[in-house]
Amino acid sequence: MKSQSIKKCPECGGINLFFNKEKGEVICKDCGLVIEDKMIDFGQEWREFDPETAQKKRRTGAPSTYTQFDRGLGTAVGRKADLYRLTNKSKNKFFRLRKWQSRISTAIERNLKLALSELKRISSFLKLPKSVEEEAARIYTMAVQRGLVRGRSMESVVAGAMYAACRRHEVPRTLDEVSEASGIEKKEVGRTYRFITRELNINVLPSNPIDYIPRFASSLKLSPQTQSKAIEIVEKAQREELTSGRGPTGIASASLYVAALINGEKRTQREVAEVGGVTEVTIRNRYKELIKELDLVENIKKLRKKATR
């Protein structure tokens, strides 16, 4: 827009300008010079009173999205609902054109049609937000365009892209959950995820154990006080560098287990391990490290003394 390039008055050099959008004018407040009198109004010229009116008057379609193979910008040859208006000869031509349109689609488009439907299914199963689904579709599209799907199953690449999108948006989903939703082995999902992120130069930060605590605490039916205590334990462990080189789900699960003991909400190691998707041995090892390094032994001893009284 022309008015956007106007930064000062050509007459007095002042920068105190007034943009009158109703009259389409740009006026200098210092000397009164009308600098521009034909500003373009990019606003809509109609009013909307309900969603139906807004939909009818809108001149553009839906925004482009990676969750559709043609990004939502493609067109189709007619609709089957219009068949009753056509003659027999026109119907034959209609079906012939639709057949040829499906035939001329590229291999990438055919791959995306199948893969994106699988991606939507996994996203629905894991109850992921639309932003994560969009990011996963973008990553998969880039992988197909780079030829990274060759030699690998489509489902494993979809699962790897989905896990990468969850990590990028800091949505806590474990490899076990993605594996269960996709039907692909956990090791294969992890292997494909590492391959995709390496080849596409996708920077993914390490998972934060705190992100998993609300979900695990909800599944274990723990109180908000226990959840806050677990977050406090994780933050202390991070300051002491106890979390480096250890799985975030194991740290989160062990922190919840310790916090539950301190607050008198007993949960077995098996219950916590099942919710966190780790083994009981991992819970025991992380538990010993936390109470030893963070001086939590006294708190647990006091609790046990109260329980025996």
Image (tube, rainbow, N blue to C red):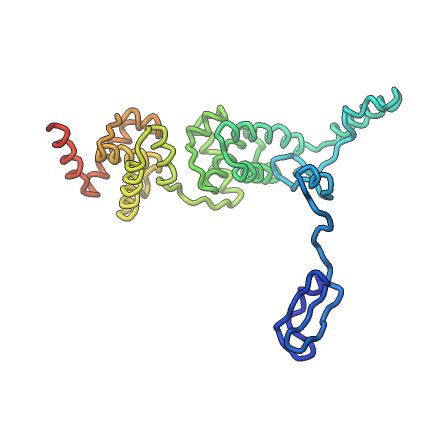
Res. 65 image quadrant: top right
Q: Residue furthest front?
A: 49
| Of residues 18 and 210, the one drawn nearer to the viewer in this rendering | 18
Q: Position of residue 237 (x, y in %)?
A: 27, 44
| Of residues 269 and 300, the one drawn nearer to the viewer in this rendering | 300
Q: Is residue 138 above or below residue 126?
A: below
Q: Do we see residue 307 in this rendering? A: yes
Res. 53 image quadrant: top right
State left or right for residue 262 relative to residue 219: left
Name the residue rendered at 25%, 33% in the picture: 260
Q: Residue furthest left?
A: 309
Q: Position of residue 227 (x, y in %)?
A: 31, 37
Res. 215 image quadrant: top left
Name the residue rendered at 32%, 43% in the picture: 244
User: What count of labels does the image hold?
Assistant: 0
Q: Do we see residue 277 in this rendering? A: no
Q: Residue furthest top?
A: 88
Q: Residue furthest bottom?
A: 12
Q: Position of residue 233 (x, y in %)?
A: 27, 42
Classify the position of the N terminus by image quarter: bottom right
Name the residue rendered at 62%, 73% in the picture: 15
Q: Is residue 276 above or below residue 204?
A: above
State left or right for residue 126 relative to residue 220: right
| Of residues 202 and 8, the one drawn nearer to the viewer in this rendering | 8
Classify the position of the C terminus by image quarter: top left
Q: Is residue 43 above or below residue 126?
A: below
